């Protein structure tokens, strides 16, 4: 993934959110591709605002809505992390404040998981489906989804599983409306 490829990917993810009726009402969210060294420096600078704290997390975001993505990862991987980060942005812009961390990260993981599905679906319908790399892409997407589903982390993994149960029952919109009204999840 390089700077050149990041814009089209961002556009694709914004369109995915729009199809869900969740337009992200901020035209410019600065996206920075950074290497490991730069990521460390950024983290030190905005530690208070950075939700992702572990080194293995590949994206950091802060309340000022700058999204930092690690350089050099495959498009599918960068896409799912961007889809995750865009949900933080959407929640902030739509006024979901002070959410429980498990709820917030869980919702972001739900969107990452859904984006992988939608990406594979749209690839299946395009001429990409005929290319030799398609099967690999499909398997990589399944692998990334499995990683989200079985993540042992008590915030990310548990959050995903809790929000998955809620969205399976009440849909994404129903769940988000419920959270907005009550501050808790159904
Ligand atoms: Zn997050």
Image (cartoon, helix red, strand yellow):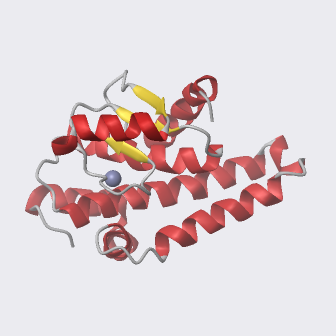
Q: Quadrant of the N terminus?
A: top right
Q: Residue drawn at (73%, 64%), measured in percent from left and top?
A: 139
Report if residue 66 is visible in the image. yes
Asked where in the image residue 32 lies, by quadrant, the reply is top left
From what the image shows, is residue 186 above or below residue 41? below
Q: Residue drawn at (90%, 49%), measured in percent from left and top?
A: 130
On screen, residue 59 versus residue 141, left or right, reads left
Q: Residue drawn at (36%, 55%), measured in percent from left and top?
A: 108
Report if residue 20 is visible in the image. no
Residue 120 lies, in percent from the top left, at: 68, 54
Residue 60 lies, in percent from the top left, at: 35, 43
Q: Which residue occupies the foreground of this view, 129 or 157?
A: 157
Q: Quadrant of the C terminus?
A: bottom left
Number of labelled discs?
0
Q: Which residue occupies the foreground of this view, 119 or 140?
A: 140
From what the image shows, is residue 10 above or below residue 183? above
Q: Residue drawn at (58%, 50%), measured in percent from left and top?
A: 77
Residue 81 lies, in percent from the top left, at: 47, 49
From what the image shows, is residue 63 above or below residue 8? below
Residue 107 lies, in percent from the top left, at: 33, 59
């Amino acid at each position: 993934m390089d700077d050149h490829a990041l814009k089209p990917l961002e556009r694709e993810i914004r369109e995915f959110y729009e199809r869900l009726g969740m337009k992200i009402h901020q035209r410019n969210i600065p996206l920075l591709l950074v290497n490991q060294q730069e990521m460390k420096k950024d983290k030190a600078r905005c530690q208070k605002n950075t939700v992702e704290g572990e080194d293995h997390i590949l994206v950091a975001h802060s309340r000022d809505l700058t999204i930092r993505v690690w350089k050099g990862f495959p498009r599918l991987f960068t896409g799912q992390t961007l889809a995750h980060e865009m949900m933080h942005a959407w929640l902030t812009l739509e006024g979901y404040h002070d959410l429980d961390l498990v709820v917030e990260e869980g919702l972001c993981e739900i969107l990452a998981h859904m984006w992988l599905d939608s990406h594979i679906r749209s690839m299946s319908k395009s001429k990409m489906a005929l290319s030799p790399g398609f099967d690999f892409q499909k398997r990589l997407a399944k692998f990334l989804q499995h990683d989200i589903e079985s993540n042992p982390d008590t915030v990310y993994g548990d959050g995903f599983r809790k929000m998955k149960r809620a969205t399976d029952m009440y849909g994404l919109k129903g769940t988000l409306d419920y959270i907005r009204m009550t501050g808790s999840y159904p």
